[in-house]
């Protein structure tokens, strides 16, 4: 009797997973749990972005802010101090600070063109970090001899791919290297994410066409000029729409390139074996 896909995956001695989905549904939690066993290599796309592909831009942004303060400017110019972001797997705030929010500069906003330029920088950085996955799979095995590999992607992966293209330049190599797994949230999860975001709005990356449309819509609806936009109000306004925009894109990625697991099942999987069983069942 031939094995099911779930059985074959469960018995695989070198499991490789790429998690994707909205931030806040358990990607990093699961990745940390697996890494802590000592059997899984954890590759964080967001960490790679912050330390390699956007590291210099993030640090330069912090230095530019410091140069506005006379005492810090003097010390920077004399090399008396240095400024560098303190990035870790669990602290990626410097990336959010770099992305920023558009709107009134007196409220911490960026001019819309500068905001779009940073969005473009982030998109290039995220794509580069995703394409680095194969290198880290090889590194995990050849250098560190980890049997298993987990890649924790950012929520915006769906913005840069076309799941309907069978030759998509990002999804094609990723799917050849590892199993793409979508952590799908329920309506209740979405409502909680919106409530959480409303309490503490954080910068996000958007597909350029989506950003252009939502920015124009916001300006018209609020009858406001770009430099008068409240930055937090704009990204709150955008968040629920961004979730709705991303949902079918995630769905297409899972249907055509990977597999879907539910966020509630992930939450109940408190051990690596339980989590692997969830994937086996989805494949089976």
Image (cartoon, grey):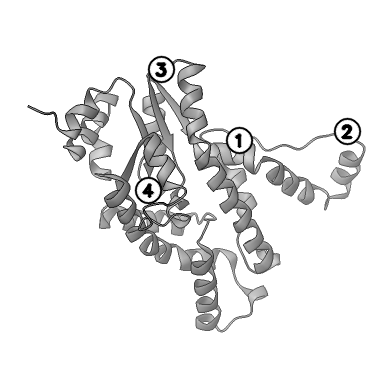
Q: Report if residue 108 is visible in the image.
A: no
* Dot 4 or dot 1, earlier in sequence: 4
**Closer mark to the observer between disc 3 and disc 1:** 3
Q: Report if residue 235 is visible in the image.
A: yes
Q: Where residue 139 appears, x then y in whole percent?
A: 51, 23
Badge 4, how many Cα within 10 Å: few under 14, some, many 20+? many
Residue under the point 53% across and 56% down: 205
The Cα–Cα distance between marks 3 and 1, rounded to whole angstroms, is 22 Å
User: The residue tagged with tag 3: helix, strand or loop?
Assistant: loop
* Quarter holding residue 108: bottom right
Q: Which residue is mark 1?
A: 87
* Dot 2 or dot 3, earlier in sequence: 3
**Closer mark to the observer between disc 2 and disc 3:** 3
**Closer mark to the observer between disc 4 and disc 1:** 4
Badge number at residue 80: 2
Is 186 on the left or on the right of 125, as rendered?
Answer: left
Badge 3, how many Cα within 10 Å: few under 14, some, many 20+? few
Q: Where residue 226 appears, x then y in whole percent?
A: 64, 75
Q: Are marks 2 and 4 in contact (CB under 8 Å)?
A: no
Q: Where residue 151 appears, x then y in whole percent?
A: 43, 35
Q: Which residue is mark 3?
A: 38
The Cα–Cα distance between marks 4 and 1, rounded to whole angstroms, is 22 Å
* Dot 1 or dot 2, earlier in sequence: 2
Q: Nearer the viewer, residue 265 or 162?
A: 162
């Amino acid at each position: 009797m031939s094995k099911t896909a779930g059985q074959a995956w469960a018995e695989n001695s070198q499991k490789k997973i790429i998690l994707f989905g909205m931030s806040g549904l358990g990607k990093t939690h699961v990745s940390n749990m697996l890494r802590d066993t000592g059997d899984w290599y954890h590759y964080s796309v967001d960490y790679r972005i912050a330390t390699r592909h956007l590291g210099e831009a993030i640090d330069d942004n912090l230095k530019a802010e410091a140069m506005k303060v006379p005492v810090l400017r003097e010390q920077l110019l004399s090399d008396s101090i240095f400024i560098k972001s303190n990035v870790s797997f669990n602290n990626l705030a410097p990336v959010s600070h770099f992305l920023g929010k558009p709107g009134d500069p007196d409220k911490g906003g960026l001019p819309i063109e500068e905001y779009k330029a940073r969005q473009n920088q982030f998109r290039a950085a995220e794509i580069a970090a995703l394409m680095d996955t194969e290198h880290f799979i090889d590194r995990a095995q050849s250098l560190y001899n980890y049997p298993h590999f987990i890649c924790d992607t950012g929520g915006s992966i769906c913005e840069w791919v076309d799941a309907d293209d069978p030759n998509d330049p990002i999804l094609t190599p990723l799917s050849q290297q590892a199993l793409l797994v979508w952590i799908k949230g329920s309506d209740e999860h979405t409502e909680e994410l919106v409530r959480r975001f409303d309490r503490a709005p954080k910068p996000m990356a958007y597909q350029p066409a989506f950003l252009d449309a939502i920015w124009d819509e916001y300006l018209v609806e609020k009858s406001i000029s770009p430099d008068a936009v409240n930055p937090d109000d704009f990204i709150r306004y955008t968040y629920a729409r961004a979730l709705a925009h991303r949902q079918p894109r995630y769905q297409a990625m899972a249907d055509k390139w990977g597999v879907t697991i539910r966020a509630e099942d992930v939450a109940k999987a408190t051990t690596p074996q339980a989590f692997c069983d969830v994937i086996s069942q989805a494949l089976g």
